[in-house]
Structure formats: structure tokens, C-alpha cells
């Protein structure tokens, strides 16, 4: 059947493939003529059809900073045929995210988001409008409020205790893959908070969900031809990407259908029950219809998937980079351990309430987020209407990337910008809430990440436990000088290679 199909349709397909670049050249020339009439931001030279894609490299945030050093803090580039504004300084980020916040409050549509996140009805990728406002309100007040985050503290305690126990079993015997430990921790916390239980590969009947969840994060970052060349998404069918997206969506949809069914059939939980999970809350909101938007089951699924994607990747990546920076900066490691152990004393139990007194530990995480923001270019914004920035005309529906990584390493803002120096935040008013534009790993303005508190609690509590219970060493043959610090970009910026460290239990077994 397949061979016969290609024999019958090969000439048609070949004609389409030949027609594709010709049509793009025509459109490219037309758009170029239109743009020349406008006072657009400076742009590097672009090639026909692909625009500036050839200048991005494997680490776009690095390449874009290099280009911005030549073309300025507001730079217009083209990802294929898509005009994209790149913002590279804190001053310009404030213009976009504060002064003109409403003008840049929307999101561009992505093929993967449309297929995997139910037509981008999740909060993160949903276009600006009444639906997004209501879903965000639900997330902020019902799912991710400080009270709710504190209520599920028992989940963090139990999962971190499991991680500590597993690490202790490897003490002085073998190196521990902390990259894997952090991913397991973050996914377990999110799974229990969102769904009410863990779904791991060890659970009977749940291995498919673990596999689908991993594939989801890969597919959301996959290259889609249709995203860069609108109208040519059919090429994603030929490459097989479209089929993978549909299979993943069908698998996850079937899983969530069962989860929602189980929650509907279970005993209704009291709103103050600490075991109430995000699905319970969203189903209650759906029943009560207290907002201006009626949540469908697909909307609930999209919102829960948001929690998985954002909550797992960002938390695990930040913990991975934090321990990487600490092991390569031993004096900072010792200082952080001394603070944690002084606050905890000899009670032999780390409690979340203790974190309030650990200012240096908070500075360590803040410094990690400065050097290694999980999403170096943040989630892209899109202009709703035409805007004038610094005298430049920004057309409507222009994609906007904020290079938070470049801003965090700007020598005009930071002394010794490439060095890991948590002390720089001692007595500093700079925080992570989006008001200080030199440090915006969670974004700012209307589209700031509402999961900041959720992530911070997990990161701080996990790090406090790692520093209290263990001392850390490099594996045999590895040193500070030869540790590979290469990055890899997926849904978040991870180390390219797993972080392997040898734990030494700090206390004698008799204690």
C-alpha cells in the first residue's frame, strides 16, 4: 500500500516540494518590501526562506546575546518567515513587560501546544483574553496560592524524605545521579499535588503515563515546520512529527479521562482537606461555575498538564544547576551548609518553617536563577497591536523573546557577572517577583509565572535537606576543572550530562 501510494503520488509531492521554496521567495520579497517602509528595529542580515535560523546554533540564548551586542537591545530577527523581537537588557524588558504590558500580553500559537495542550487552553500558552484571565484567576487563587502551597507541605516532606533515604543508602559507596533524583522528586511532588497520587513506571498500569509525560516535554520543544512557515504544516505530516503529537495526545487524553472519572466517583473532599488535589479543585470550580468561564474537561486536562510541564522541568533543572555551582565553589558550599546546620541544630529534622531563617540558602538559589534561568528566553510573548518602542515600530502579532539569561549576565548590571557569588544578594532588595527587571527568571507583568511560590518551596526545602544531611564530593577522576558544564536546551536549560556526585553522611550513625 505504501509503495503504491508513493508511485501514484510521487510527482505531486515532488511538485509541492519544488513549489514550496518558490512561493516562500515570493512572500519573502513582498514582506521585505512592506517592512522597508517602516522604522523597524535593527536586524542582522537574513537569508531567503530561513531568515536568521542559521545564526541561532544549539544554544539560542547565547547566539542572540552575541547578535544583540552588535545590533542592540531591541533586535528584529526572523525565525523562518516569523518576525521576532529579541529583548536583551533590563531597561527594554521593563518597557515590554511593564510600560507596554497589555500590548505584549498575548502568546503565539504553536502546533505542539495546539495538539498537546488542547488548542492552547492551558494558562501558559493561552492567548490573552477573558478565558485566560479566568483560568489564571483559578490557578492563582485556587491551585497555587500561598495557602494551598503550604497545605501540601506534607507532600514535599514525604518525597524529600524518600530522596534523602535513597541517597543515604549510597553514601561513600557510589556516585548518585542527582539529575535523575531531582527529576523524580519534582515529578512526584507535582503528581501528588495535581492528581492525588504518584504515577511512576513502578506502578502497575501507570508506566504508559510516565513514558507519555516524558515524551510530552520532548514534543513541546520539537521543531515544527508549520510554526515557522505558516501554511506548510503538512510537511510535519511527512516527517512523522504530526503523528507523534497525535499519539501522545490520545494517550494522555485517555489517561486523564480515567483520572477525572475516578475523581468524580470518589467521595467528595472537604475544601480544607489537606489531601485535596488540583483535579478535585478544578472539578469543584467546574460544578460551582463561580467564574465567567465554564471549564470543560479538556480545559481541566490542559491546566493539569501545565502543572506537570512547568513544575517538573523548572524545579529539577534549578536544583541540578544549584548543586553544580555549589560543588564547583566549595567555600560557598561550606557557608551554605554552616547556615543550614546552625538553624537546624541537633534536632535531626529539617522542617519547612526553618527555611525562613536561611537567608544565605535563598541567596544561593537566587544566584543560580540569575546564571541559569530555567527558560533562558522565557515563554514568548506576542504583540496584540502595533507598538512604538524607543522610536521603532513593532507590528502586531510580532513574537517577542526576552533574553533573561543575557540580562542576568549583563556586566552593566552585575559585578563579575559570570561568577557564582550569592553574597551579592546579601542586604539586596532585589527579589524574584518580577519587579526587578535585572532578575526575571519567572517573567514579569501579567504573564509572570504563578507557580513561583510552588517551585521555590520545593527547591529551598530540598536543598536544605541535601546540605544538612550530606557532605558532597566529586567521583573519582572528576575535578572542578574537568567537570563538563555544557548546557542542553529542552523545555528547560539542563546540564548536557547528568550531575554525578558522591554523598558522605554528615552525622555518625549513633546520633
Image (cartoon, grey):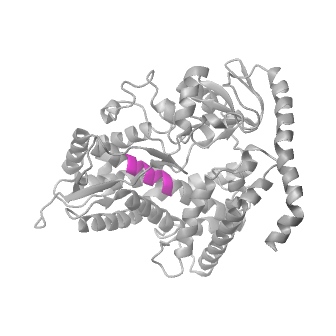
Nearer to the camera, 53 or 368: 53
In the rendered image, the residue lying farthest to the left is: 510
Residue at figure coordinates x 12%, y 62% from the top left: 508
- From where the camera sits, is residue 298 visible? yes
- Residue 66, given in percent of the width and then of the height, sits at 54, 27
Q: Is residue 315 magenta?
A: yes
- Residue 160, given in percent of the width and then of the height, sits at 35, 63
Q: Quadrant of residue 360?
A: top left
Give the dominant element type of the magenta stretch: helix, strand or loop: helix
Q: Is residue 434 left or right of residue 358?
A: right
Nearer to the camera, 89 or 295: 89
Q: Is the residue 413 above or below the residue 126 in the image?
A: above
Q: Is the residue 335 above or below the residue 219 in the image?
A: above
> In which quadrant of the rendered image does the N terminus lie?
bottom right
Q: Is residue 299 left or right of residue 184?
A: right
Residue at figure coordinates x 58%, y 65% from the top left: 281
- Residue 38, given in percent of the width and then of the height, sits at 80, 21
Query: Magenta span covers which residues?
Result: 312-321
> In which quadrant of the rendered image does the C terminus lie?
bottom left
- From where the camera sits, is residue 109 visible? no
Q: Is residue 286 left or right of residue 162?
A: right
Residue at figure coordinates x 82%, y 49% from the top left: 17
Q: Is residue 362 magenta?
A: no
Nearer to the camera, 493 or 252: 493
Nearer to the camera, 308 or 78: 78
- Residue 438, given in percent of the width and then of the height, sits at 48, 30
Q: Quadrant of residue 371?
A: top left
Amino acid at each position: 500500500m505504501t509503495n503504491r501510494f508513493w508511485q501514484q503520488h510521487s510527482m505531486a509531492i515532488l511538485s509541492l516540494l519544488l513549489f514550496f521554496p518558490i512561493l516562500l521567495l515570493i512572500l519573502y520579497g513582498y514582506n521585505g518590501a512592506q517592512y522597508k517602509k517602516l522604522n523597524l528595529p535593527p536586524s542582522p542580515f537574513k537569508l531567503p526562506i530561513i531568515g536568521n535560523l542559521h545564526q541561532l546554533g544549539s544554544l539560542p540564548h547565547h547566539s542572540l546575546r552575541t547578535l544583540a551586542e552588535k545590533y542592540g537591545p531591541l533586535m528584529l530577527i526572523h525565525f523562518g518567515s516569523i518576525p521576532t523581537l529579541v529583548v536583551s537588557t533590563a531597561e527594554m524588558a521593563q518597557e515590554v513587560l511593564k510600560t507596554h504590558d497589555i500590548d505584549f500580553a498575548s502568546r503565539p500559537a504553536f502546533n505542539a501546544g495546539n495538539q498537546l495542550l488542547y488548542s492552547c487552553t492551558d494558562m501558559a500558552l493561552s492567548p490573552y483574553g477573558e478565558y485566560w484571565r479566568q483560568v489564571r484567576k483559578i490557578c492563582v487563587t485556587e491551585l497555587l496560592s500561598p495557602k494551598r502551597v503550604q497545605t501540601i507541605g506534607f507532600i514535599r516532606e514525604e518525597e524529600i524524605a524518600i530522596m534523602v533515604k535513597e541517597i543515604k543508602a549510597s553514601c561513600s559507596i557510589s556516585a548518585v545521579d542527582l539529575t535523575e533524583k531531582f527529576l523524580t522528586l519534582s515529578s512526584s511532588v507535582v503528581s501528588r499535588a495535581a492528581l492525588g497520587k504518584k504515577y511512576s513506571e513502578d506502578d502497575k498500569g501507570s508506566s504508559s503515563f510516565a513514558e507519555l509525560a516524558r515524551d510530552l516535554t520532548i514534543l513541546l520543544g520539537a521543531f515544527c515546520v508549520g510554526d515557522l512557515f505558516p501554511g506548510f504544516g503538512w510537511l510535519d505530516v511527512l516527517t512523522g512529527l504530526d503523528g507523534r503529537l497525535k499519539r501522545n495526545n490520545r494517550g494522555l487524553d485517555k489517561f486523564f479521562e480515567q483520572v477525572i472519572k475516578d475523581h468524580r466517583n470518589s467521595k467528595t473532599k472537604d475544601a480544607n482537606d489537606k489531601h485535596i488535589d488540583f483535579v478535585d479543585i478544578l472539578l469543584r470550580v467546574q460544578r460551582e461555575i463561580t467564574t465567567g468561564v465554564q471549564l470543560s474537561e479538556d480545559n481541566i486536562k490542559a491546566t493539569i498538564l501545565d502543572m506537570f510541564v512547568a513544575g517538573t522541568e523548572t524545579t529539577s533543572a534549578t536544583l541540578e544547576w544549584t548543586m553544580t555551582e555549589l560543588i564547583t565553589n566549595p567555600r560557598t558550599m561550606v557557608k551554605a551548609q554552616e547556615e543550614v546546620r546552625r538553624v537546624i541544630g541537633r534536632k535531626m529534622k529539617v522542617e519547612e518553617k526553618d527555611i525562613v531563617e536561611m537567608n544565605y540558602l535563598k541567596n544561593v538559589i537566587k544566584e543560580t536563577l540569575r546564571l541559569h534561568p530555567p527558560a533562558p528566553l522565557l515563554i514568548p510573548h506576542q504583540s496584540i497591536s502595533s507598538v512604538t518602542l524607543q522610536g521603532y515600530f513593532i507590528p502586531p502579532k510580532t513574537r517577542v523573546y526576552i533574553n533573561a539569561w543575557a540580562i542576568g549576565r549583563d556586566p552593566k548590571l552585575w559585578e563579575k557577572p559570570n561568577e557564582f557569588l550569592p553574597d551579592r544578594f546579601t542586604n539586596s532588595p532585589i527579589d524574584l517577583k518580577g519587579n526587578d527587571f535585572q532578575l526575571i527568571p519567572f517573567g514579569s507583568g501579567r504573564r509572570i509565572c504563578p507557580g513561583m511560590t510552588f517551585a521555590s518551596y520545593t527547591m529551598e526545602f530540598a536543598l536544605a535537606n541535601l546540605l544538612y544531611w550530606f557532605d558532597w564530593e566529586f567521583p573519582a577522576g572528576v575535578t572542578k576543572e574537568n567537570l563538563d558544564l555544557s548546557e542542553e536546551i529542552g523545555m528547560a536549560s539542563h546540564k548536557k550530562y547528568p550531575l554525578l556526585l558522591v554523598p558522605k553522611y554528615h552525622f555518625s550513625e549513633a546520633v
